[in-house]
Amino acid sequence: MANVKKIIAITIGGLAVLFALQNTASVPVSFLLWEIEAPRAFVLLLTFTFGVVAGLLLAHAMQKDAVRKAKAKTTKE
């Protein structure tokens, strides 16, 4: 099983490198009054990372809320 995880990790890493090599063109990024130029791969990977972090935070908050509601329901009974 550990070998399968290593193979999957190496494959994903290789795909990430291939993606970065194929998306080197600089693109402008504007946000409110802020504007920079960055490689397309960096912008996409950064956006993906922000999405993952936001999803994890939301999932954690929802799980915490469910636990709190379960505790409140148990205390009422």
Image (spheres, rainbow, N blue to C red):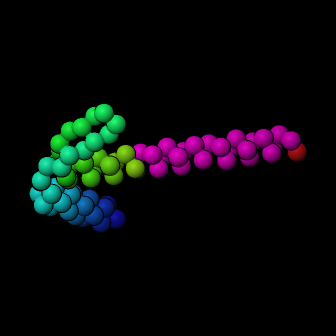
Q: Is residue 69 magenta?
A: yes
29 sits to left or right of 25:
right
Compared across the picture, whether 23 is left or right of 76 comes to left
Residue 36 coordinates in the image, percent (x, y)? 20, 38
Report the residue at 40% width, 50% height from top: 52
Residue 56 position within the rendered picture, expressed as x and y whole percent measured from the top left: 47, 47
Q: Between 74 and 23, which is closer to the camera in this rendering?
A: 23
Span colored in magenta: 53-76
Residue at point 14%, 49% (across, down): 26
Residue at 28 percent of width and 42 percent of height: 30
The verdict on residue 21 being magenta is no
Q: Position of residue 40 (x, y in %)?
A: 19, 52
Above or below, 54 against 22 in this view is: above
Q: Is residue 6 visible?
A: no
Which residue extends farthest front? 33
Image quarter in which the N terminus is found: bottom left
Task: Report the label total.
Answer: 0
* Quadrant placement of the C terminus: top right
Residue lying furthest right in this view? 77
For the residue pair 34 and 77, the one nearer the viewer reads as: 34
Specify whether residue 26 is in view.
Answer: yes
Majority secondary structure of magenta residues: helix
Viewer-nearest residue: 5 or 63 = 63
- Describe residue 66's horizontal placement relative to residue 45 as left or right: right
Question: At x 65% / y 43%, what residue is drawn?
Answer: 65
Residue that extends furthest to the top in the rendered view of this protein: 33
